[in-house]
Image (cartoon, grey):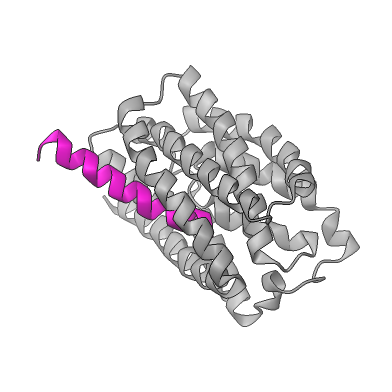
Amino acid sequence: MNDVVWYLLLIVAGFLAGVVNTIAGGGSFMTLPALMLFGLDPKIANGTNRVAVLFSSGAAVVTFHRHGHLDRELANRLTLPTMLGVPVGAWLAVYLPPDAFEPVFGAIFLVMAVVLMLNPKRIAAANVGSVRSRRWIKPVFFAIGIYVGFIQAGMGILILLAMSLTNSGDLVASNAVKNWIGFLVTLAATVMFAIYGLIDWLPGLVMAVGNVIGGVVGAKLAIKKGNRLIFGFLIVVMIATGLKLIVTSVYQWLG
């Protein structure tokens, strides 16, 4: 297969991931395998993937902002603790194998998918969080920052779940904040990976073309279809993400 075809496949994978990342999260489970099939080492693919995610989240943020769905004050308040966790996670990603905690996170995603299906109001209804739960917002987002720096994939899922602590209930507004946080923390992680020489810029930028288009399309779909679309995407992606993490870990253990 020649290089032109590979680059076209990277753009297609980027587009699909951009849509999924913007609406729910977990698009990196499409782009990471695509980058590794392209011939990149897993650690280089992990760093290169941040370039594409950076562009898609940026495009999504601009789209949400233009339609008046971005709460900048809330976004900035939640970004700080998340940003503090990113360097810790990126440092771990440099020195630990990327699959170190995959089965644990996989199980968490599956459990939370079941919990949300049984009780959708946990994330999609307003005023579900208590004062005590809101006290956990900063520690929770710091932990998410560590995860983002470490593996990135599934970041949007975790942020949307954590946004339920803000008592919002508006998944479109939460999605806008999620993409804002995702853009800034991915920028920080990209800088860290670039410093360590773990980014192959050409395939990353080519994939970013698809990611940008997917980010805009995903944001417009989320705005148009609202909470129901986002909730449906979230459940499907959580189950797929959880199964993928667990199956991959079992396969590597058996192999």
Inspect this view and state whether residue 44 appears: yes
Query: On the picture, is 119 further left or further right than 210?
Result: right
Residue at position x 47%, y 64% from top?
Answer: 237
75 inside magenta stretch: no
Stretch of the chain drawn in magenta: 1-27
Which residue is rendered at x = 68% and y = 55% of the image? 68
Q: Along the line of sight, which residue is nearer the eye, 195 or 253?
A: 195
Q: Is residue 26 visible?
A: no
> Residue 48's x, y, as percent?
39, 32
Residue 184 percent coordinates (x, y): 62, 36
| Foreground residue among 65 and 8 | 65
Asked which quadrant contains residue 231, the reply is bottom right
Looking at this view, name the residue that lies furthest to the bottom.
118
Identify the residue at horizontal 61%, vertical 53% (top origin).
64
Instruction: Name the side, left or right, on which 233 lies relative to 11.
Output: right
Position above or below: 58 against 102: above
In this view, the residue in front, 255 or 194, is 194
Magenta part, dominant SS: helix
